[in-house]
Amino acid sequence: MVFGIGTPELVLIAFVFLLLFGAKKIPELMKGLGKGVKSFKDGMNGKIDDPDSTGTAAETTKKEERSAE
């Protein structure tokens, strides 16, 4: 039990959620939520927000230094 919410209440919440958003929209919402959590974790770890870069700022700087040589 989380905060006094039992199984019947969770089932009711899930049912209302399904009615509001529909079965086709829920996977899209979860995908967006997952991207948001990943972006938040990347930001907390200091990774760059640039979609072209795949590493941290230090890794990007090292790559740029190697390519300049």
Image (spheres, grey):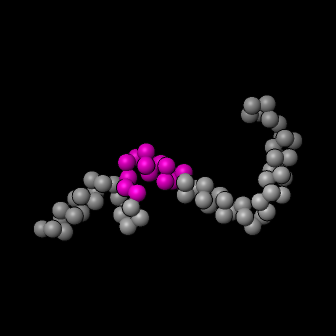
Q: What residue is rendered at 43% in x and 49% in y?
A: 43
Identify the main secondary structure in magenta.
Answer: helix
Residue 17: in magenta span: no
Residue at 61%, 61% in the rendered image = 31
Question: Is 26 on the left or on the right of 47, as rendered?
Answer: right
User: Residue 41 at x, y = what percent?
Assistant: 47, 48
Along the line of sight, the residue nearer the viewer: 1 or 16:
16
Tell me where residue 18 sits by quadrant.
bottom right
- Count every numbered label the image shows and give the total: 0
* Quadrant containing the N terminus in the rendered view: top right
Is 45 on the left or on the right of 32, as rendered?
Answer: left
Q: Is residue 46 above or below residue 3?
A: below
- Give the residue at x 37% y 55%: 48
Q: Quadrant of residue 44?
A: top left
Please tell me in which quadrant of the rendered image residue 8 appears.
top right
Residue that lies at the very extreme toward the front in this rendered image? 20
Q: Please name whichever residue, 16 or 8, is drawn nearer the observer in this view of the structure.
A: 16
Place of residue 67 in the rendered image (x, y in percent of width and height, measured from the top left): 19, 69
Indicate yes or no whether the magenta region holds residue 39: yes
Residue 58 coordinates in the image, percent (x, y): 27, 53
Q: Which residues are magenta?
A: 37-49
Quadrant (top left/top right/bottom left/bottom right) for the C terminus? bottom left
Relative side of 2 to 58, left or right: right
Q: Is residue 8 left or right of residue 69?
A: right
| Above or below for 12 versus 21 | above
Percent of width and height locating residue 59: 28, 57
- Residue at the far left in the pictured view: 69
